[in-house]
Amino acid sequence: MALENDTQAPDFVLTNQFGQSVQLSQFRGEKSVALVFFPLAFSGICSNELCELRDNLSLFADSGVELIGISVDSRHTLRAWGEQEGYEFSLLADFWPHGGVAKEYGVFLDAKGFANRATFLIDQSGIIRASFITAPGEARSLAAYRAALDELQPA
């Protein structure tokens, strides 16, 4: 079961597509984070989803939110895919232990061996403020991201 809103986001350290370590807690007090789990690089729905995010990066930047993609692919696969698609955000390899971070967030699909399409919006304190998951084979909408980003804004 996926983590619920208003709970502490588990910290983690993973390698991005360039071989650099990225730790979730490094953003605390600095930026909110949109953590975007996706099944597999180079797949149709994932490519369409992340290209839509790439084309709307200002939506995140204007809200002071760091966009981070995460999948079970290797960093080498993520780098090739990121360069092909022109992604200018981090893609993290949840490669080993296989899907370990996705499991911590409750979005790993054991029978398939990869994460579900799940998004967690984490505030500067490390608290999950908004999240959404789509059914297998269903893309996330940009409207869902906009609504989630609104949840991060102070009242």
Image (cartoon, rainbow, N blue to C red):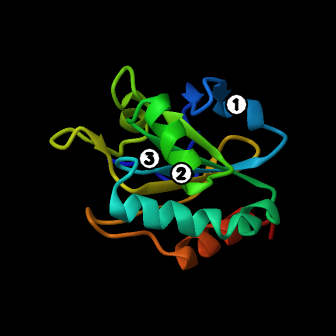
Secondary structure state at the residue bearing disc 2: helix
Q: Are marks 1 and 3 in contact (CB under 8 Å)?
A: no
| Residue 92: mark in rendering | none
Q: Identify residue for label 1.
A: 25
Q: Identify residue for label 2.
A: 84
Residue at point 76%, 37% (across, down) = 27
Q: What amino acid is at disc 3?
A: Leu
* Picture coordinates of residue 76, whole percent (x, y): 48, 30
Secondary structure state at the residue bearing disc 1: helix
Q: Earlier along the polypeptide chain: callout 3 or callout 2?
A: 3
Q: Give the foreground label among 1 and 3.
A: 1
Q: Identify residue for label 3.
A: 3
| Residue toward you, 125 or 101 | 101
Residue 150, picture quadrant: bottom right
* Picture coordinates of residue 54, whole percent (x, y): 63, 62
Note whether residue 54 is visible: yes
* Picture coordinates of residue 138, whole percent (x, y): 32, 70
Q: Earlier along the polypeptide chain: callout 2 or callout 1?
A: 1
Q: What amino acid is at disc 1?
A: Ser
89 sits to left or right of 153: left
Query: Label 2 to label 1, Cα distance in Å?
Result: 29 Å
Residue at point 38%, 51% (across, down) = 42
Residue at point 56%, 75% (across, down) = 142
* Picture coordinates of residue 81, whole percent (x, y): 49, 46
Residue neighbourhood size for the residue with mark 1, other residues' Cα within 10 Å, grouped as few (<14), some (14–19), many (≥20): some
Query: Label 3 to label 2, Cα distance in Å?
Result: 32 Å
For the C terminus, the quadrant is bottom right
Q: What amino acid is at disc 2?
A: Gln
90 sits to left or right of 110: right
